Image: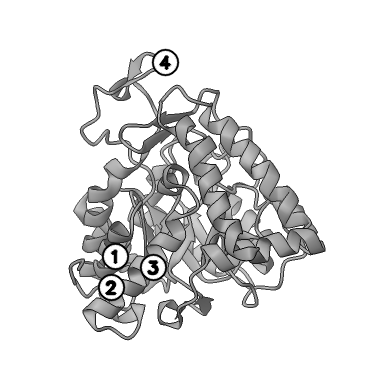
Amino acid sequence: MAEQQAPALADLYQRFIGPLLQRDDGADAEQLSRLALATLAQLSQRRRWPLVNGALVGLGEQLGRRDPRLEQTLFGCRFANPVGLAAGFDKNGVAAGIWQAFGFGSAELGTVTWHPQSGNPRPRLFRLAQERAALNRMGFNNEGARAVRRLLERQGLPPPGQRPAVLGINLGKSRIVPLEQAADDYAASLELLAPLADYAVVNVSSPNTPGLRDLQEEGQLRRLVERLRRLPGCPPLLVKIAPDLEDDAIDSIARLAYEEGLAGVIAVNTSLDRLGLQERRLEATSRTLAEESGGLSGRPLRARALEVLRRLRATAGPALPLIGVGGIDSPQAAWERITAGAALIQIYTGWIFEGPQLVPSILEGLSQQLDRQGLGTISEAVGSGLSWR
């Protein structure tokens, strides 16, 4: 019975959800995400019920790929495999207890802000079906750190270090907080959520909160990181950067990460650059991408995300763990990012378009590459520069 569950899910996704994703004007992208998360939240809350547990175990057996060669321990966290869910989907952590059932080795929750906020006006999430991409200007919509803590506690998660999937918490600045008070705002969220996080991420790169990207400037980022690392019980701390930074700024962040003892850098967030799609018109607004605000994600971001990652690796060297995000929607794209220097990868837009089968497809592809390249572990592939075979 378990052998049939995951194929049935993949088939159902492609049969019923897939057609909705083939057109820009299909089902509303944000509404689809809300419906999916509502279902996942119920499953996570009830995952110990026998019937629910049986279904999740069967799902995990099919979507997971257990290969010891794909395991790594980074910044004190044991990752069963290098594929993670990127921040932005499970903003409030409502499905934190079940992401391993979809094959993920990790999931990043959030972005979470101290103050609850509804985000930007709708419409704020747009599908670019032909390009396998999305434009979003969500604006850190979330329930706020205190509510997120209650939601996580209600799920009865195992403590950090004892979970089947590593859980990171991505933190952002509240929109109503002035930039000069950002450090205190981040610190309030981190202090509250630290006991529940395997690692935490300082998100200073979303394009949808006014002024936020100014915090990537070396002096401001250094002060922010120093403030957070002084907190008692601070978990491993990473920073997430934008793809639109100049090379000098990327180099500065790499040096800062080393000097301040950051656990790693996540590259990259969504892009304000339209990446050749300036004249692409959104059917929902009849405006071009050049005229629209928001960050671009998905396949068009792949080349730039790879460039940023390579620059970070060249400056920081192999000691600093890097997480590659942006435009990863195939095993080859995943291998490309890992061999360029990413110890871990994260997916979101590609996962939505390709469906639940993307995770096992990537994991199988990585295992096959280890065989073909004669490598013993995925760690040996990181930064190796080896081409796809």
Local SS, label 3: helix
Name the side, left or right, on which 210 lies relative to 40. left
Separation of residues labelled 4 and 1 (CA atoms): 37 Å
Residue tagged 1: 335
Separation of residues labelled 1 and 2 (CA atoms): 8 Å
Q: In this view, does 135 lie above or below 181?
A: above
Q: Which residue is drawn at 44% across and 17% down?
A: 284
Residue tagged 2: 369
Residue tagged 4: 285
Q: Which residue is drawn at 55% across and 64% down?
A: 62
Local SS, label 1: helix
> Going by the picture, which residue comes out furthest to the top?
286
Image depth: mark 1 or mark 3 in front: 3
Is the residue marked by circle 1 packed among few (<14), some (14-19), or many (20+) residues within 10 Å?
A: many
Local SS, label 4: loop
Residue 364's disc is 3
Image depth: mark 1 or mark 2 in front: 2
Separation of residues labelled 3 and 4 (CA atoms): 40 Å
